[in-house]
Image (cartoon, rainbow, N blue to C red):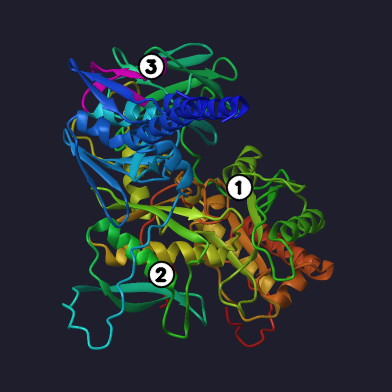
Amino acid sequence: MRPLAVRRAALLAAAALALLFERSAAAEDATLFWRGQSYPVAASGTEFRIADAARALGFEISSDPTTGVLTLTGHGHRVLVGAGTAQVPVDQQLVPISRPAQTVSGALYAPADFFEKVLFPLVGATGTYDASKHLWTLSEGSALAIDATVVRVAPATQVILKQSVPAKFSPAPAASSIAIRWPGQTLVAPFSEHRYEDPFVSAIRFTGDSATIEFREPGLAARAYALTGPDRVIVEISRAGAPSQAPAVPAPAPETAAPVIVIDPGHGGVETGAIGTGGLQEKQATLEIAARVAATLPKTLPCRVVLTRDTDLLVSLDDRTSVANHEKADLFLSIHANSSRITNARGSETYYLSLEASDKLAQEAANRENQAPSLEETPAAGSSSNRDLDFILWDLAQSAHLKESSELAEAIQDELNVVSGTANRGIKQAPFRVLVGATMPAVLIETAFISNPEEEKKLSSPEFQQSVADAIAKAVARFFARRRSGASGPPPAATATPTPAAPR
Amino acid sequence: MTRRAAALLLLSLALAVAGLILWTRGGPVLAGRRRARLFLRVTPAAAAPSPGAAAVTPVETVRLTLFFLGQEDGKLRSEERDIPKPNGAGAALKAIFNELQRGPTRPDLVAALPARIQLRNAFLLPEGEVVLDLAVDSGLSFGSDEEIGIVASLVDTVLQNVAETRSVRILVNGEPAESLGGHVDLTRPLLYLRGELAP
């Protein structure tokens, strides 16, 4: 062999070794040091083999051969881990982790915070991964994992601090903030600081054993109380003197000011909504119809109209309702185009909120809310367990308007039946997210089936769009006229000339 | 030692070390890259018995009540089906999902679940809450009726068939979500949706 060939072989060998050693270093195993013993935990990049740590901590491990779900049982707890899911069921709760567990060579691996937020607290230990030493050194004493959520419940804002385990807390209110302290606890915080667009809460910061909620303006009132199942601290922030709970049904008082009507064109941005076979996107049709409704309504009755979007923009469902609540709207109308797996489905439909899906749970939670201690109490021993209904006040807000929402839906459906020339399909109820938080009568209007080629063509025609807008405006005017007259029950039906019942 | 022999020795040594490292570490990183993430793990179907083969021991079965959409009105209607008895809650939930996705046998019914929704994981929590983690193709879009049909078909079928269950929580792609496609509220556990059943 010539010297050049030898040099090439040597270079190739060196490169192969370097690559392998680099790979080896990237996946260097971790060590778990607990109660005077060291346990190896296999690593793959920044993920660690769950079974290694669980076994070291005394959990029994079983794996479901059909689903691949790993069950860890021990210390009075049960943990379920499945590949691809970043929510870990721990007993009756779901604990969020930064990244989902993943399968590597047939074993489940998880990021470091799975061990720190889920496993270590279950054995009464706490520890943070030292990446430079590839080491967890656990100390006795449970860490308290906190998950923070900010929810606008007009006229207040709720900060929900969900705890991994029950813990005593104490609030420290100040002019521009309120600090929630868990004395003596080691916190596993979801972040060190997070900023919010909420009207009352500008930021939440975690330092030491405290979470500090910064107000957007000084002088806001705050009250904190604990709920269980899951264990959490609720901090409710409102303007001083404002009612802290969702308002009751506004009396149909004499309307001196022009009513405010919020029109919500469904979907938008990357969320196209349903797409017809001819390519029409629901977001496009809803925007065009909503613009026509907004232009037509003021010609039918004196009112102020607000659109939740007037361009091709993605707006979250909760933000759409927030617009209506912020504007103190009198009505909320969400405009959509329907789609069905039933190929010949056609016609229009009007929905109002159904609480069927969560009525029982909502009632349980409502009872608990009513019994909530006023301030700084830790959960009472034996207090009724509840389910995770963080947005219960939103439910209550719309449930107070269900009767009027039903009347409005009926008025709109009557008029739309005339437009579509179909037999009355009746109004419907469904657990639609966009209706849940509305603190005023609210309906979702399915103008026509975009999945039906014939109706898809109608949806893109200006004539049909305008006839739908006219029908909605007429129904809204009738609704307000009826309300002003103080009459109860649905407004008188429009005259329809129905064709034979349309299949869905 | 000749230069050629030295080069061969060096190369052999490198390959031996490489093999040893891969073998002892089980190659998690390489394997992790090679292995695609399978969201739905399908149990291999049993091979069909060949003619003249010995009689197979009867498999214990369970009867499922599955809810599909009625072709006429889009309301949920039931169809019963026997399947091999699943071993445990997770396997039962997986089997139910698979049967819903397989669709109805009756011509007057339509499957509510599109093929591009897969079941990533299913958990049964101690107090009867079922958690279904759906892998939903980002290109999917739904209308209201379609979305209600998907959710109601899943929720009602699960609560109908799995004992001791009281609610179903649906996650989308591993995380909590407002909805599947802009309509049905998924931020809380869902109870039996009786309003979607055919009268």
Rendered location of residue A392, percent (x, y) = 42, 43
Determine whether, in the image, residue B54 is placed left or right of residue A295.
Answer: left
- Mark 1 residue type: Ala
Tag 3 residue: A130
Disc 1 and disc 2 in contact, CB within 8 angstroms = no
Question: Dot 1 falls on which chain?
Answer: A
Q: CA distance from mark 3 to mark 1?
A: 64 Å
Q: Quadrant of the C terminus of chain A?
A: bottom right
Question: Dot 3 falls on which chain?
Answer: A
Q: CA distance from mark 3 to mark 2?
A: 47 Å
Check residue A355 for magenta coloring.
Answer: no
Disc 3 and disc 2 in contact, CB within 8 angstroms = no
Q: Which residues are magenta?
A: A123-145
Q: Visible in this render: residue B165?
A: no
- Mark 3 residue type: Asp
- Dot 1: what SS? loop
Query: Counting other residues with Cα less than 10 Å from the Cα at mark 1, is it few (<14), some (14-19), or many (20 or more)?
Result: few
Tag 2 residue: B100
Rendered location of residue A398, percent (x, y) = 50, 49
Question: Dot 2 falls on which chain?
Answer: B
Could you say which is closer to the camera, residue A84 or residue A273? A84
- Dot 2: what SS? helix
Rendered location of residue A452, percent (x, y) = 67, 75
Seen in the picture, residue B122 relative to A55 is either above or below; the reply is below
Pointer 3 or 1: first along the chain: 3
Q: Visible in this render: residue B100?
A: yes
Q: CA distance from mark 1 to mark 2?
A: 51 Å
Tag 1 residue: A253
Query: Counting other residues with Cα less than 10 Å from the Cα at mark 3, is it few (<14), some (14-19), or many (20 or more)?
Result: few
Residue at left 69%, top 71%?
A415
